Image (spheres, helix red, strand yellow):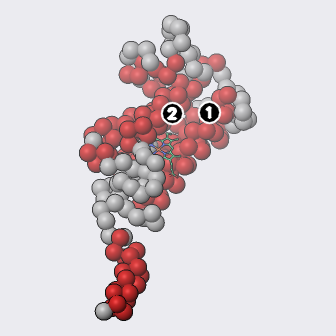
């Protein structure tokens, strides 16, 4: 009797990982999760590269600016939406189940950042050899007292094609933060 209990326990331990693996959420080694996390890291590196070119922490290079903006544009929008299919959400990944519950809002954010990134990539395609004043935050916008990050009513609805590159970058970073605060959780 006792021997059977012990053998049974040993089998449970051995079978543990197999029993636990099939759940609705993706496991830690899920390739879809790994791919989207890698994609997010590439967006982060690209956004950092552009930010540092604008704040002088790294040399401005039109070709590098264009490459980074293209990375953002390629990974935002529809590509971002496609990286979060049902069945890959929730722990242990960093994607909250709310993505499935508030899909339209998630997709709207992905499309919004996509439009901004497309506009930035267009501008970067014609980037001058040096950063010019009209690429800077605030260029072409009424100076009405620290209206950073499009907090002025209506500013976010303005045509991205008419915004200075640095302003687009700040709106892009705002979308990263908005999405993370609602749809991202600590990974387990
Ligand atoms: C529409 C929503 C959304 C947008 C926009 C978004 N993210 Fe994410 N991001 C997520 C979610 C959800 C995760 C968690 C993914 C997971 O762990 O499966 C994540 C994870 C990450 C991670 C962690 C990746 C890892 O290795 O675990 C980084 C870094 C990141 N995002 C950077 C960015 C940057 C930079 C931007 C903007 C340029 C951005 N994200 C825009 C939703 C978004």
Say if 87 sits above or below 180 in the image.
below
What is the distance, in whole Å, between disc 2 and disc 1 at their CAs?
10 Å
Q: Residue at x 27, y 41 (%)?
A: 102
Image spot of residue 144 (x, y percent): 50, 7
Q: Is mark 2 within 8 Å of ligand 1?
A: yes
Determine contact: label 2, label 1, CB under 8 Å. yes
Task: Answer left or right for 137 relative to 180.
Answer: right
Q: Is mark 1 within 8 Å of ligand 1?
A: no
Q: Quadrant of residue 16?
A: bottom left
Image quarter of the C terminus: bottom left
Task: Answer left or right for 51 relative to 56.
Answer: left
Task: Answer left or right for 5 relative to 174.
Answer: left
Q: Residue at x 36, y 70 (%)?
A: 21
Q: Residues within 10 Å of mark 2 (few under 14, many from 20)?
A: some
> Element under label 1?
helix
> Element under label 2?
helix
Image spot of residue 163 (x, y percent): 50, 22
Does any portion of residue 119 appear in the rendered image? no
Foreground residue among 137 and 101: 101
Image quarter of the N terminus: bottom left
Residue at the spot of label 2: 173
Foreground residue among 183 and 175: 183
Say if 146 sits above or below 41 in the image.
above
Residue at the spot of label 1: 51
How many badges with numbers are in the image? Answer: 2
Q: Quadrant of residue 48?
A: top right
Image spot of residue 179 (x, y percent): 41, 38
Q: Residue at x 41, y 82 (%)?
A: 14
Image spot of residue 117 (x, y percent): 48, 36
Q: Residue at x 54, y 49 (%)?
A: 41
Disc marking residue 75: none
Does any portion of residue 75 appear in the rendered image? yes
């Amino acid at each position: 009797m006792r021997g059977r209990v012990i053998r049974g326990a040993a089998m449970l331990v051995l079978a543990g990982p197999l029993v636990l693996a099939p759940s609705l959420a993706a496991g830690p080694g899920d390739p879809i999760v790994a791919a989207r996390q890698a994609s997010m890291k590439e967006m982060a590196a690209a956004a950092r590269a552009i930010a540092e070119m604008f704040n002088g922490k790294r040399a401005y290079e039109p070709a590098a600016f264009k490459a980074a903006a293209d990375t953002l544009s390629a990974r935002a929008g529809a590509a971002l939406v496609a990286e979060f299919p049902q069945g890959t959400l929730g722990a242990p990944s960093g994607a909250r189940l709310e993505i499935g519950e508030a899909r339209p809002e998630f997709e709207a954010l992905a499309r919004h950042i996509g439009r901004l990134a497309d506009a930035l990539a267009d501008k970067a395609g014609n980037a001058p050899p040096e950063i010019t004043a009209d690429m800077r935050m605030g260029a072409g916008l009424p100076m009405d007292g620290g209206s950073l990050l499009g907090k002025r009513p209506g500013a976010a609805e303005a045509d991205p094609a008419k915004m200075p590159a640095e302003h687009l970058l700040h709106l892009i970073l705002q979308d990263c933060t908005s999405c993370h605060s609602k749809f991202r959780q600590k990974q387990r």
